Amino acid sequence: MSRLFKQLKEVRSNLGITQVELAYQAGISLPTVQNMEANRANPSLETLESLANFLGLEVCLVPKKSDWETLSLYGVPLIRTEKTPTKIPRTVEKMIQALREACSEIQNSSATPDYDRKLEAVQAFLLALEMHFPSVFKEYCRNSNVIIQTMPRVITGRLIKLRRLALANLVEYL
């Protein structure tokens, strides 16, 4: 929450609004505003919405960005950058969580320039997981709608090639 409070304080300051004015206009107490800006508060969603509305902001949940570099280390066949860490947590749970985030990002952002490349890479990884580690796929992926919706409908030669690349790294973690 500290990042959120810092952003609220920054917007308030940039607008030239005092803490007293913000508290009065948003209908909350001055100590609440002060404690939020000092990162000592745990405000309700209603309080955050009141502050945001007065500051001309909107409170909304946005899917977090996927960590594509970590996914490539797990085996998603994407090109790695030099900044890619060589050690990552070797747990199936973390891998599946990163995979869910990637599937969610893919489904919510079809307009990105590298959408097709990421979609194919994730589909190939899912295909490798389903074909070569069916018990893991069944346990962790079968009940995830976001993963099931990302599964390939048609298996192309390119997907088979990418699946082989995915499998080469995937075997290290499973």
Image: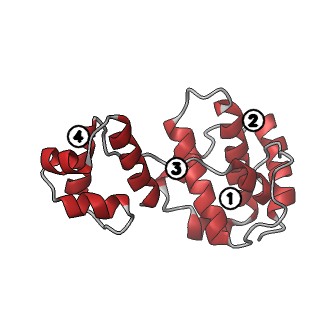
Disc 2 + disc 4, Cβ < 8 Å = no
Q: Position of residue 105 (x, y in %)?
A: 55, 43
Amino acid type indicated by mark 2 = Thr
First of labels 3, 1 by sequence position? 3
Disc 4 + disc 1, Cβ < 8 Å = no
Amino acid type indicated by mark 4 = Asn
Residue occupied by mark 4? 53
Q: CA distance from mark 1 to mark 2?
A: 16 Å
First of labels 1, 2 by sequence position? 1
Q: CA distance from mark 4 to mark 1?
A: 46 Å
Q: Nearer the viewer, residue 95 or 13?
A: 13
Q: Nearer the viewer, residue 61 or 42?
A: 42
Secondary structure under tag 2 reads loop
First of labels 4, 1 by sequence position? 4
Q: Position of residue 138 (x, y in %)?
A: 59, 67
The quarter of the picture where residue 171 lies is bottom right
Amino acid type indicated by mark 1 = Glu
Q: Which mark is residue 166?
A: none
Position of 18 with respect to 131 (left or right) is left
Q: Which mark is residue 130?
A: 1
Position of 19 with respect to 65 (left or right) is left
Q: Is residue 4 above or below residue 113?
A: below
Callout 3 crowding tier (Cα within 10 Å): few <14, some 14–19, many ≥20: few
Q: Which mark is residue 64?
A: 3
Task: Name the residue rendered at 36%, 58% in the picture.
Answer: 37
